[in-house]
Each structure stands twice: as C-alpha cells, then as structure tokens.
Image (cartoon, rainbow, N blue to C red):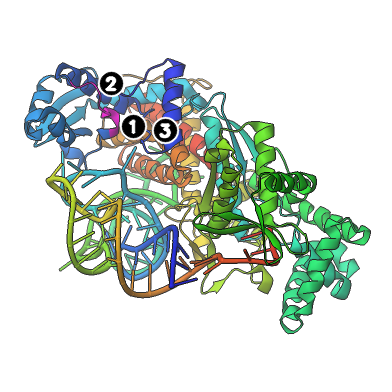
Amino acid sequence: MVPRGSDPRLTRERALFYFGCGKVRATMGNILWQHVSERVEQALAELGVEEFDVAGTIEVPPDPNLGDYAFPCFQLARILRKAPDRIAQELAEKLGPDGLIERVDVVKAYVNFFLNRPATCERVVTEILSRGDEYGKSQMGSGRTVVLDFSSPNIAKPFHVGHLRSTIIGHSLARIFESLGYTTVRINHLGDWGTQFGKLIVAYRKFGRPERLQQDPIRELLDLYVRFHQEAETNPALEDEARAAFKALEDGGEEETRLWSEFRRLSLEEFERIYQRLGVHFDSHQGESAYNEAMEETVKRLEEEGLLTESEGALVVELEGLPACLIKKKDGATLYATRDLAAAIHRYERYQFDHLFYVVGAPQQLHFQQVFGVLKKMGFPWVERCEHIAFGHIRLGDAQLSTRRGNVIFLEELLDQAVERVRTIIEERNPQLEDKEAIAEMVGVGAVIFNDLSHNRIKDITFDWETALNFDGDTGPYVQYTHARAASLLRRGEEEGLIQGETIDVATGQLGEPEEFQLAKRLADYPQVVLRAAEEREPSEIARHLLDLCRDFNSFYHAHRILGTPQAQGRLALVAATKQVIKSGLYLLGIAAPEAM
RNA sequence: GCGCCUAUAGCUCAGAGGAUAGAGCGCCGGCCUCCGGAGCCGGGUGCGCAGGUUCGAGUCCUGCUAGGCGCACCA
C-alpha cells in the first residue's frame, strides 16, 4: 500500500516517488478521497490484499446518481482470482456507513460510495477555513530546490506575446512548487549574447538614428533588426559582417562592447516595466553573456574528455541518435548550446538543484536534447533532473509571429488594450467603484494571463484579439468576478453580524442542498489539483479547476438565497471557503483577486 | 528524406485505461418587487482513418492521412 499519514518523512518519500518518475497520479490532499481510500484499504486488508494503489484506483462516477466516489474492482480480479462483481460484493459487505459515508452500493464491479451531505459540507468547509491560506499547500518539497529558467527574452528584441507564455508559465510553476514547500530559484536567462548583436551593431552603424534610440529604444532596435534582414536578402555579405562584429564583441572590441551594453541597458528597462505589470520577479538575471569565461572552461573540459571532434571547421560533440551538437563555429565564436552547457554546470554547482526546468518553446526541443545529451556524455548524473518544459507557439491567424519581419504584437499593447476594455466595462456597469484604475489593471492583465494559462501548454495558440479581449465564459474576469461576488457577500454578512473579523462559525446542520454539496466536493479537490499541476508541470490544471469551481459556486448562488435565511451562517462559511480557494488558485496562476470590480 | 508535436461539437478547448465523452464561444429561448446580469437555467446523434493490446481504448501500441515545428556555424 502506498504510505501516507502525517509523518513528514513518509509524505516526503511519496513526493519523491511522484516527482521522480511522474507516472503515479497525485491522489493526496483530498480529504474526502483520502477517507474513502482508507476505508477501502482496511476492507481490502481483511480480504488479504495489502499491496494495492487504492487511492489511485478510486474515481468519480460519471453520474452523481451512481455515487460520489467509486472503487472499480476489475484489477483485483487478477489478484484474487475471482469475478470482479463478486469482489465488489464482498468488499461492500465489509464497508458499513460511518460519519462521512452514508451508504455503500454495488453496481456490477463497482463499489459506489454515497457521502453524507451535511457532514461532507461541514468537514470540507471546516478544513478550508481552519487552514486558510495554507489550504492546498504542503511541505512535500521541503529541503528540495527547483531552478526555473523562464522568460529569457532576447535583448534588443521587443517583448511580444510570444514571450508571454514562458514568462507566465514559469512564474506560475515557481509559485506552485513553492506552495509545495520547494525552494525555488527564478532565473531570467537573458538572451544578451550571440550573433544577433553582430546584426544590430552592423545595422546601427549603417542606418541607426541615435536620437531615436534614446527616445523610443525598443522600436528603434526592432526597426534596425527588421531593416537588417531586409537588406541582407539582397546583400548577403551583411551576414558575414554581422558574424565578424559579433566575433569582435566576443573578443572584447571596445566600440562593439559599448553598443552592446547600451542596447542591453535600454532593453532591460523595457522588460522591467512589463515584469512589474505581470507581478513577475527573478532571483537572477544572469544571461548568456555571463558565461563568457565559464564557456572556455566548458570547452576545455570537453576537449580533455575527448568529446570534441572537428567537422567542417567547427567543433562538435557527436551524439547517438541525434545530430551532432555544435560547440564552436569555424571562426571560433560560441553558440547557444555552448552557453547553455556552461550555464547548466554553473547552476548545478551553485544550487545543487533537484529539478532544473527550462520553460522554453517546443521548437527548441532538439536543442535541449542535444544539450542534455552532451551533459550526459560529460558524466553529470544530474542531467536526469533537467527538464525541458515545452510549450506550443503562438500563431497569428495565418501569419506567423516573426521578429525578423516585424510581424509582432507587443505585449504591452495587448495589456493596454485589455485594461482599456475593462475600463469601459467598469464605466458601464459599476461606475461608482473605488480604485477603478487599479482594478482595471488587475482585471485586464489577469484576463491576458488567464487566457494563456487555461490551455494545455503544449498546444499551439492561435492568437486573435476577439478571444483575448472577450470576458464572458471561461475567462479570467469570470473567475475574478466570482471572487468579488463572494467578497461582497462576506462584507454584507459582516454588516449583519454573522462574521466577526476574520472568523466565521461553521454552523452545523445548515448545509446539504445538492448545489452546496457539489460545491463542497469541488472545494475538496483543490489540494489534489495543485499536486497534479506540479506533477504535470501544467498550470492549466489550476485554471480549469477554478472555472469548474466558479461554475459550481454561481449555480449555488443562483439556486439559494444566502443572506436573511436560517442557513445564512453555514452558507456564508461556504462562501468564505470558496473565496479562499479562488484566491489561492489565482495566486498560483499569478493573477490578482480583486475584492470588488 | 529523418525526428518531434498536434488531430474530440460550426469555432476554441477539457477529458487520471473504466459506467451514458464534457465545458466555453457563437446561435435560439427563458431568468432580477430579492445577496453584484463580467451571472444563472434550457436547447447537441462530435473522438482523422485502419489494425492491435486489454475484461474494458478518445486515452496504450503499430501503420496510414492531414496540419504544425525542428533537422550544424541563428537563438
């Protein structure tokens, strides 16, 4: 049987198991699920079955009329050498009702559990309100470190919607792992080195407008970048010039270094403004340029171990089943892979990480296979702890986003439009709202983040303004609105004396209506959802769970009056529990939870 | 040519090897003398194709088809 219990070491072992192989489902954290699991385990022990993943086998029936939880007995048939229907029957005989389980039914090979509704609601609400912000958190990752490499925009290119995904997926994953007790290190591996700077330097010398660079640096740098590629089509010699300029930069050329450093500074200022709006921060901004010296050591080490071979003038590491990994160009300049190798080694030496996540787009999969392959050949066992957290790219209708063609949507423009849209809606529906500007920012930015994080990260996203700026249905504003609605109810409850400060009584026997019960069951799922999001490295698990939760809450809200009823106390407690979970979930996504909007 | 990813309702997407495959958008029709209408309720013969594994496959395997992305001197 899978170990469980309050012993932190057991919990920790289990976490290692999950997060080590990623094959076993996260089933901890749901107090209802756990209760049913424990009962089934006891009953199975009586039948002589000890080694069985009960919690992972339990499921939710497709139709609530069949039960709240179900245990299918098909897999036991092989172990016990009996018909599954008969096992279900025998198992059910050993399972009587208790405080939480009202009755146990058998339908064919399924043992179905019906929970006592009032007891379930009370148990869940009590759990959430007593744990507060701690509900959904755990210490399973305590003492372990996750290093996340995310956002990592290229200097001298505008921050566009393509960078958004890495930034917010990485930010959300960092918060998710933190909430499980992991120590996190957020690294913005800035793309501040490479041939693109050769291009920019060449373009700036030929077409640059110094005064515009100061006034509108990002536009000017983008224009230069686009101009370079236009000119290079008719004048391929420019490419060679750019390579030479980068080589000069790498060799410490004074003029090149001055320009590079100016471009870098101006770009960082722009990025910092965006990060502030998104609420994202980093523990390190060590970009590619930080590894200039370390790279030499890495190359030397590769050479000493005899892994380097020469091929067409360049230095490469041959890999089995993959294209060779290019380490040095024929002119001696380094490449992306060289810098990633040096960075990975440095990170392990510095952080001794248990996980290193690269939150980088799926098109770079081969690159990471190569980098990991080289690290493996170098004999670093920790390469097994490195993971490429790939995500699909953003498509723009039929046109593809391409910095080279200047075909980009600036993230800031998207955020501004979303916020503007929210302002309009607030003026229409809630013009007397306080702090309108701050709320509009929260909701507009939240809408953009949620729209992205509600999709499976591996899928490509087709960007269109209409979807991005639609606030009805499965959207961030819907979740935030539900939170604000719950907050509003609690304010009123306080006015009526049903809530004193932060505390609220969970009155007994007041809950149990179908909508209340459904909502309580959903709330009970939350800790499990967080674990699953971590295990799958998939923030969308949380986004979708919040949507389900909000739907359940709004159904409850419309079906039952809360204030001024005999059950007001109990219902307000349920509202408070819902608000708590929405707030926690939004936090894990990096989205603000407004008290009013 | 080789490799990886994707394919579920008109559109955008969920689906943990289990029972009758679900949401949102759009469209149609309802719901405020009452707690916030960014809301709620109702309206639906869809898993690309063909094999295989399994007691059981949208889910796993193989082969096709279509789309996307990669495949050394960019990052």
**Mark number displayed over residue A18:** 3
Q: Chain of mark 3?
A: A
In this figure, which residue is indicated by the disc labeled 2? A509
Q: Chain of mark 2?
A: A
Residue A545 versus residue A569 in the image, above or below: below
Q: Position of residue A447 (x, y in %)?
A: 54, 52
- Residue type indicated by callout 3: Tyr
- In the image, which is nearer the foreground, mark 3 or mark 2? 3
At horizontal 35% and vertical 41% (from top left) the residue drawn is A552
- Residue type indicated by callout 1: Ala
**Residue A318 appears in which quarter of the rendering?**
bottom right
Position of A255 compared to A76: left or right? Answer: right
Q: Position of residue A199 (x, y in %)?
A: 78, 68
Position of A392 compared to A213: left or right? Answer: left
The verdict on residue A129 being magenta is: no
Q: Earlier in the sequence, mark 3 or mark 1?
A: 3
User: Helix or strand or loop: what does disc 3 sit on?
Assistant: helix
The mark tally for this picture is 3
**Mark number displayed over residue A552:** none
Q: Position of residue A243 (x, y in %)?
A: 78, 67
Residues beneath discs 2 and 1 located on the same chain: yes
Asked if residue A430 shows in the view, the reply is no
Q: Residues within 10 Å of mark 3 (few under 14, many from 20)?
A: some
Residues beneath discs 3 and 1 located on the same chain: yes
Residues beneath discs 3 and 2 located on the same chain: yes
Q: Nearer the viewer, residue A46 or A438?
A: A46
- Which quarter of the rendered picture does the N terminus of chain A lie within? top left
